[in-house]
Amino acid sequence: MVKDSKPRSGSLAYLPRGRASRLVPRVKYWPPYEGEPKPLGFLGYKAGHLTAYYIDTTPNSPTQGQEVAKVATVIVTPPMLAAGIVAYTEENKSLKELLRIWSNKVPADLIQRKIPSWRPNEDEGLKKLESLRGNIMEVRIIGMAFPKQAGLSKKKPDIVEIKVGGEIGKAIDYAVSKLGQEIKISEVFEPGDFIDVIAVTRGKGFEGVVKRWGVKILPRKKRKGRRVVGAIGGRTPEYVPYTVPRPGQLGYHRRTEYNKRILAIEEDGSKLTPKGGFPHFGIVRTTCILLEGTVPGTPKRPIILRIPARPPPSIEPPQLLYAGIPT
């Protein structure tokens, strides 16, 4: 008789499993992009889940051309303000900040709560930008999202740097033209696009090895405990390898999920809001998107939407039939 084996679950690639350093995640990688200049990401807020009914357009799928029902996530995406521009140059094969410009149209009372030393420098900054144009390797927009517009009670804006894709000269011109202006989600993505989702997962606090790593519960007669590992090691010099399951933080980790498809972009979010509103969020009253599948985090959590780093083959946009039944 062959003994059944169940190795403990949990990837070692995500060690250490520590708490995320910030609620609005930082984007560590911007994929290459060729085309007309545009921001390569957007910031939204998770509202809740629905059941989406649509015609499956995936080639060679068993349900191709048929109506399917899948879980979908509503992400509220109010317009972002292009509050500033950051120009980077290359030094020692890495990016180094060359210039940071803040728009004069930024609400001073809001941003000074977050950055006390903030001062607008649009006029002199743009002049300096032109003189340094030949040294710029990458340009990013400082996107400012207002949770209040999404229906949250938070007053401080959320700030994130978003790379402008395209040829560097056109990207700089685009960033300058958008300085102090609003950017809508429809300017960045379209229905049917695949995107990557970067967010902080739901926190579960301090957990033991059984829940954190899926180790086997020991027999009933075990003297020193059952929900523990049998041994943390026996070697000289005495130390515990990092591969041994240990208790600790579970959840509230920064994670990236790849290739989520946009089913719809809705200007009036109330059309996708179930009767009575989303639990723990309420009624969506601004622009939102319907994303196939689930995303990490709790309702009201900031979500970074980014162009795909591992883009799949492009397929025909789905034909959305109905969405509105909460799952």
Image (tube, rainbow, N blue to C red):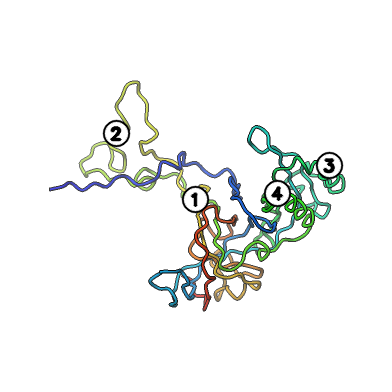
- Image position, residue 325 (x, y; %): 49, 75
Q: Mark 1 points at which residue?
A: 203
Q: Give the Cα distance between marks 2 and 4.
A: 50 Å
Q: In this view, does 244 lie to the left or right of 150?
A: left
Q: Helix or strand or loop: what does disc 4 sit on?
A: strand
Q: Name the residue under label 2.
A: 231
Q: Is 48 rendered above or below residue 18?
A: below
Q: Which amino acid does label 4 sit on?
A: Arg
Q: Mark 4 points at which residue?
A: 140
Q: Nearer the viewer, mark 2 or mark 3?
A: 3
Q: Quadrant of residue 239?
A: top left
Q: Mark 3 points at which residue?
A: 131
Q: Helix or strand or loop: what does disc 2 sit on?
A: loop
- Residue at 70%, 59% in the rendered image: 80
Q: Which of marks 3 and 1 is in front?
A: 3
Q: What residue type is labelled 2?
A: Ala
Q: Give the Cα distance between marks 3 and 1.
A: 47 Å
- Of residues 225 and 278, the one nearer the viewer is 278
- Residue at 60%, 49% in the rendered image: 30
Q: Which of marks 2 and 4 is in front?
A: 4
